Image (cartoon, rainbow, N blue to C red):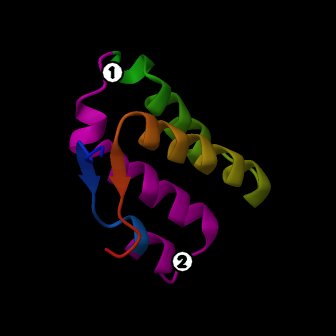
Amino acid sequence: MSRWKYVVEGWGTVFRADADMTAKHKMLAELLRASEWYASQEDGERSDLAQRLRELEHCADDHGADDVLWEIYNLADAQRAWLDPET
């Protein structure tokens, strides 16, 4: 059984926040940039995660953001990061 290497708390709180989606995308990017998971990225600002966060911050529509969010979830799974939906 695999264990989570990183836990990102606050993910669910941002999704439940009373803000428009653009603001939520920026809050999610800020949350992830402040996380231990982000700090552990070997390529820093050139990492796949950093690239996805830049894309998320600049999404023009919710459909594009959904695609980027799925990519972030896939990275999280691959790198054993739990994006806590409850906190």
In what element is the residue under mark 1? helix
Look at 45% across and 42% down and name the residue there: 77
SS majority, magenta: helix
Magenta segment boundaries in residue numbering: 13-42
| Residue pictured at 64% horizontal, 44% vertical | 68
Q: Separation of disc 1 and disc 2 at Cα? A: 29 Å
In this rendering, is residue 1 above or below 62?
above
The percent position of residue 33, horizontal first and vertical second, equals 33, 43
Q: Is residue 87 above or below residue 66?
A: below
Q: Residue at x 75, y 50 (%)?
A: 60
Residue on which disc 1 sits? 44
Q: Could you tell me residue 10's position as x and y percent?
A: 32, 67
Q: Which circle's residue, 1 or 2, is located before the other in the chain? A: 2
Task: Kindly indicate the quadrant of the structure image that contains residue 63.
Answer: bottom right
Count of marks overlaid on the render: 2
Question: Is disc 2 surrounded by few (<14), some (14 to 19) or many (20+) residues within 10 Å?
Answer: few
**Which residue is labeled 2 in the image?**
19
Q: Which mark is residue 76?
A: none
